[in-house]
Image (cartoon, grey):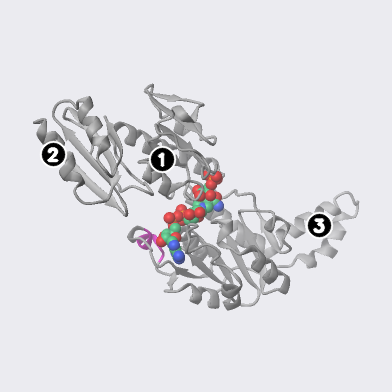
Amino acid sequence: MVKYNCLNPIAPIGLELFTESYEKVDNIEEADSLLVRSASMLDMELPDNLKAIARAGAGVNNIPVDKCAEKGIVVFNTPGANANGVKELVIAGLMLASRNIVGGINWVQTVKDDENIAKLVEKGKSKFAGKEIEGKKLGVIGLGAIGVLVANAAKRLGMEVYGCDPYISVKHAWNLSRDIIYVKTKEEIYRTCDYITVHVPLLDDTKKMINKDTIALMKDGVIVLNFARDLLVNDDDMAEALKSGKVAAYVTDFPNAKTANMEGAIAIPHLGASTEESEDNCAVMAVKEIMEYMENGTIKNSVNYPDCDAGVCVSGKRITICHKNIPNMLTQFTGLFSVENINISNLINKSKGDFAYTVLDIEGDVSESTAQKLNSINGVLKVRIL
Ligand SMILES: NC(=O)c1ccc[n+]([C@@H]2O[C@H](COP(=O)([O-])OP(=O)(O)OC[C@H]3O[C@@H](n4cnc5c(N)ncnc54)[C@H](O)[C@@H]3O)[C@@H](O)[C@H]2O)c1
Ligand SMILES: O=C(O)[C@H](O)COP(=O)(O)O
């Protein structure tokens, strides 16, 4: 029986994919795998039994990815599964920031019981006049699953769209409309655009990328949208820029104690992926990733181990090994089976950064002592026998 635990509610359409070989457990210590959305795992003790974590979503900054790799725990995410949900909210964010819709709606509430409300509206509405987005310049920083959809949709709405992503993948480049103006540096976006939207992961080199220095490069009255992570923006610098009018509006999907109270900020309660469709897509993808890994050792969409698909094992046993990416590992693995005169019918070895993954299909069985010897090889992090 494979045991799993959900650290956040996961859409039933995903959980229903688990067969009778899987059991949901409440105790994390017992779990072979975990499903999570945004719950923070950063201070969590990682149980020795844990083999896989699937983030039903994109951002993995709530998961200690490197620590997991060191323990041979494969961390998955679900790339693109919620991208459309976020794209649609970003488009809404463009409108919210351009048309003072929030201010207008709040004002209507203040006069809602006045019997002359219709007249008051016609008299008062000029306070909430806005700007149209058509013809304006939008800069998209990060052209991944979300950034590409945002760029293409904004183009279709008549905006002039600039995009920047030094690490753009071939897949995303193919999907990017050729009407998007691809620029090499973020500085070109900062200097040129009326609206700037960030769609990059939170990493050491993206943290606080929107700060007083980068804001200084921007056009006066720029609108900044952040549907990626709050720490991408220096909140104090943003508050200053909103106060001075340098930034006309800041739309964020990540309210915190500062931005929720910030004059000029429009704070949305992290709703980007909170649609039925996105939640379903993420849950289905996350559960399939866990099942494929638990049953066949297949790794797809991992953020800390290499992709590896050995198909279904057709020989005696499959052994999967998470290990360090260091010399002599394969020699030691194969040496063990050679001593026992066991034939290896299939072998795959892949690496990603400091970590590697080996799948060995053998004819016959694996003795307890061989399993122990594999486990005790220096650099081996987790061995599974399927
Ligand atoms: N608001 C929400 O509910 C919500 C939902 C999904 C994702 N997100 C956030 O949005 C981020 C992006 O999601 P995605 O699905 O598009 O991810 P993705 O991995 O498909 O795209 C991220 C892109 O950023 C690029 N990138 C990385 N570093 C960069 C840099 N320094 N400068 C420019 N580009 C850089 C990468 O090359 C990649 O193309 C996630 O990491 C997550 O933090 C938020
Ligand atoms: O990174 C993501 O996928 C989003 O921030 C969505 O987070 P959520 O699953 O908690 O809504």
Which badge, 3 or 1, comes first in the chain's sequence?
Answer: 3
Bin the neighbour count of mark 2 within 10 Å (Cα to Cα): few under 14, some 14-19, many 20 and up.
few
Foreground pick, 75 / 262: 75
- Tell me, yes or no, whether the two marked residues, 3 and 1, touch with CB atoms within 8 Å: no
Instruction: Specify the amino acid type for callout 1.
Output: Met
Residue positioned 56% across, 56% down in the render: 227
Reply above or below: 75 against 105: above
Per the image, the residue denoted by label 2 is 335
Residue 77 image offset from top left, x and y in percent: 42, 45
Instruction: Specify the amino acid type for callout 3.
Output: Trp
Per the image, the residue denoted by label 1 is 285
Quadrant in the picture for the N terminus:
top left
Bin the neighbour count of mark 3 within 10 Å (Cα to Cα): few under 14, some 14-19, many 20 and up.
some
Find numbered disc 3 in the image and state the secondary structure of the residue it sits on: helix
Q: CA distance from mark 3 to mark 2?
A: 76 Å
Q: Which residues are magenta?
A: 172-177
Residue 383 figure quarter: top left
Residue 264 figure quarter: bottom right
Per the image, the residue denoted by label 3 is 107
Whether residue 67 appears in this view of the structure is yes
Q: Is mark 2 within 8 Å of ligand 1?
A: no
Reply above or below: 169 against 63: below
Find numbered disc 1 in the image and state the secondary structure of the residue it sits on: helix
Q: CA distance from mark 3 to mark 1?
A: 43 Å
Q: Of helix, strand and loop, which mostly describes the magenta segment?
A: helix
Reply above or below: 210 against 52: below
